[in-house]
Structure formats: C-alpha cells, structure tokens
Amino acid sequence: MGQQQLLLIVLGVIIVGIAVVVGINVFTAQNTNSNRDAVTSDLTQLASMAQQYYKKPQALGGGGNAFTGWTIPTNMVKNPNGSYSATVTATAVTIVGKGTTTVTAGGTDTVQVTMVVGPDKINSTTIDK
C-alpha cells in the first residue's frame, strides 16, 4: 500500500475513535438528565398527593389543613427511578429523591432533587451530588 492509503486508514481510525468517545459522553449526559427528569416527575406526583391530603377533611381520611400523618405510599418509596424519603411537619413536607444514575462517570454521586411542599406551592431544588 502507498503512504496515502495508510494515512487515510489512520485518519479514519482516529475519526471513528473520536466519534465513539463523543457518543459515549452524549449518552451518559442524556442518561443523567433523563434520571433527573424522572425523579422530578415522581416528586411532583408525591407533592400533589401531599397537597391533596392537606386539603382533605379529617373525616374523609385527610389531614384537615395539616400535613401531619401523610406518608409516602410504600410502592413509591423506591422504584426504578430512585428512592424517596419525606420529612413531615404540620405546615410543610420536604421530599428528597435520590436517583439511580451517577452524575460523574465512574463516581458514586447520584442525582438528587428536593421538593418543599406547602399548602399552596411547591419549591424544587436539584442537587447533583
């Protein structure tokens, strides 16, 4: 083979290698974003359930304008998206969701989203740690 053909083969191998590395990085970033979105969606559903409990009268099994007594349903404590825990007071619920996807390649830090639920509002904070 001529030098030109060898040069083209080497150049082709380098370009394919770079494309594979970029593809892996894009997939990893998308996987992390997808898990973050799924955890946020689960937390939003839990926040809605907590607000429903707050507004429902005690005679009907609700909190009667208090969050006290609300718990995360057992089937939602852990799912393929992550695990969830709640701190409940009479006036607010803080729900923490920890995702299953690591934020950094090869690391142990996972996606984490926190929601603070009040009687009429929900505040969300994303912490990637």
Image (cartoon, rainbow, N blue to C red):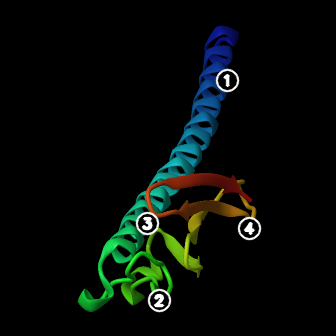
8 lies above or below 116: above
Identity of the amino acid at label 4? Thr
Q: State which tag comes first along the sequence, 2 or 4.
A: 2
Q: CA distance from mark 3 to mark 2?
A: 14 Å
105 lies above or below 50: above
Identity of the amino acid at label 2? Gly
* In the image: residue 98, left or right of residue 34: right
Q: State which tag comes first along the sequence, 4 or 1.
A: 1
Identity of the amino acid at label 1? Val
**Would residue 1 be visible to someone looking at this image?**
no
Q: CA distance from mark 2 to mark 4?
A: 34 Å
Secondary structure at badge 4 equals loop
Instruction: Tell me the number on the disc at residue 97.
Output: none
Q: Nearer the viewer, mark 4 or mark 3?
A: 3
The residue that mark 1 highlights is 10
**Would residue 31 be visible to someone looking at this image?**
yes
How crowded is the residue under tag 2: few (<14 C-alpha within 10 Å), some, or many (20+)? some
Q: CA distance from mark 4 to mark 3?
A: 27 Å
Q: Residue furthest top?
A: 4
Q: CA distance from mark 3 to mark 1?
A: 56 Å
Q: Nearer the viewer, mark 4 or mark 1?
A: 4
Q: State which tag comes first along the sequence, 3 or 2.
A: 3
For residue 19, which quarter of the picture?
A: top right
Tags 3 and 2 in contact by the CB under 8 Å rule? Answer: no
Q: CA distance from mark 4 to mark 1?
A: 37 Å
* In the image: residue 88, left or right of residue 77: right
The residue that mark 3 highlights is 47
* Residue visible at 63% across and 38% down in the picture: 21
* In the image: residue 4, left or right of residue 44: right
The residue that mark 2 highlights is 69
The residue that mark 4 highlights is 108
